[in-house]
Amino acid sequence: MLVVMKPHATPEQIAGVEERIRSLGLTPHAIPGAQRVAIGITGNKGALDPAAFETMPGVADAIRVSQPFKLVSREVKEEDTVIDVDGVSLGGKAIRVMAGPCSVESKEQLLEAAHAVKQVGATFLRGGAFKPRTSPYEFQGLGEEGLKLLALAREQTGLKVVTEVMDTDQLPMVAEYADVLQIGARNMQNYSLLKRVGAVGKPVLLKRGPAATIKEWLMAAEYVVSEGNYRVALCERGIRTFETMTRNTLDLNAVPVLKALTHLPVVVDPSHGIGLRAHVPAMARAGVAAGADGLIVEVHPAPDRALSDGHQSLTPAEFAGLMTQVRVIAGAIGRPV
Ligand code: PEP
Ligand code: MN
């Protein structure tokens, strides 16, 4: 259920509705909107009777929400969510590009990548300090040393830092350095991590699980938002299909479908999506054409020497080319990059 307040409802009227919701043993979630406040209700087992709220002072309407994901749905919040990442927006008209190495490997590697991507228009620096690797014998990341290097790169370039947090033990440390907490594909349904990340209140980039349906993914986002953190962006990074020529199958269907179902920003990861360096720019262009609000792209000063995902990482020069192409596509649909 969603209780929509009148445009000029007073703080007392809003508090009155929240109190009524609590008195029923349920949880109110005030959803800020440009014109008016709406209050989402969670915790009910069956459908609620709208009449319980419709006649309260300041209430414009009480609407049943048909989707199982409530707070992330467009039914509950019609306007797009624009995430404020410390002064940089994600989810508005402008398309944001996040770029950088798969893993933070060294000071020289990270700084070179950061300056290069900044120079051609990226606004976020990506880089993993804690890496979820398929094999325990592969490079696992530099840990806190990597986080410190990300902070140094931010200081030098002004780029916002996106980095992965793999578990709840790491969360306090990663949250200290990150501007955006990345939840990796393998962790999309780690519900204790999702709840804790929701409570921390930092912006979150929630990657899609390789075998997750769009509904499961939105339910995962609901875990974060239901803790009171609306600053969540969804990242399509490819799903597992029968195809073996590509690392994953970038599901660009998800982009318009998500934009219809949810108010949250959608980011496309063409690097993991196709997994082949030569084809990353094509899928980046396609992601923007499909309506993505952002891209996240792996860039390495020397991809052939990368400790992870070198085969899908672009050189700085290739990334510059991608940016030029992406700007043309974005311009055609009226969006700046
Ligand atoms: C990554 O961004 O380097 C990464 C590990 O991504 P994913 O969780 O999508 O596999
Ligand atoms: Mn990677």
Image: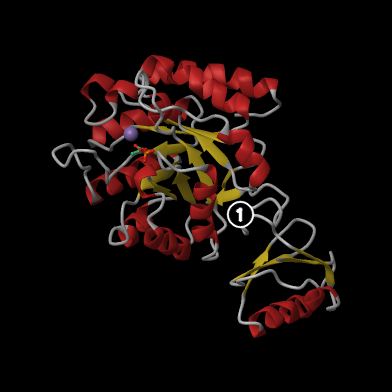
**Could you say which quadrant of the image residue 312 lies in?**
top left
Evaluate whether residue 302 shows in this view. Answer: no
**Residue at the image point whose x is 22% and y is 42% from the top:** 141
**Residue at the image point whose x is 62% and y is 24% from the top:** 289
Q: Between 215 and 309, which is closer to the camera in this rendering? A: 215
Q: Between 217 and 112, which is closer to the camera in this rendering? A: 217
Residue reaching furthest to the left:
137
Q: Between 227 and 328, which is closer to the camera in this rendering? A: 227
**Could you say which quadrant of the image residue 39 lies in?**
bottom right
Up the image or down, 302 lies above or below 37; here it is: above
Residue reaching furthest to the bottom:
23
Q: Dot 1: what SS?
A: loop
Question: Could you classify mark 1 by the number of other residues whose Cα lies within 10 Å: few (under 14), some (14-19), or many (20 or more)?
Answer: many
Task: Assign the C terminus to one quadrant of the image.
Answer: top right
Which residue is tagged 1? Answer: 72
**Residue at the image point whose x is 29% and y is 28% from the top:** 309
Return the x and y of residue 157 as percentages of the image width and height: 42, 37
Return the x and y of residue 127 as percentages of the image width and height: 34, 39
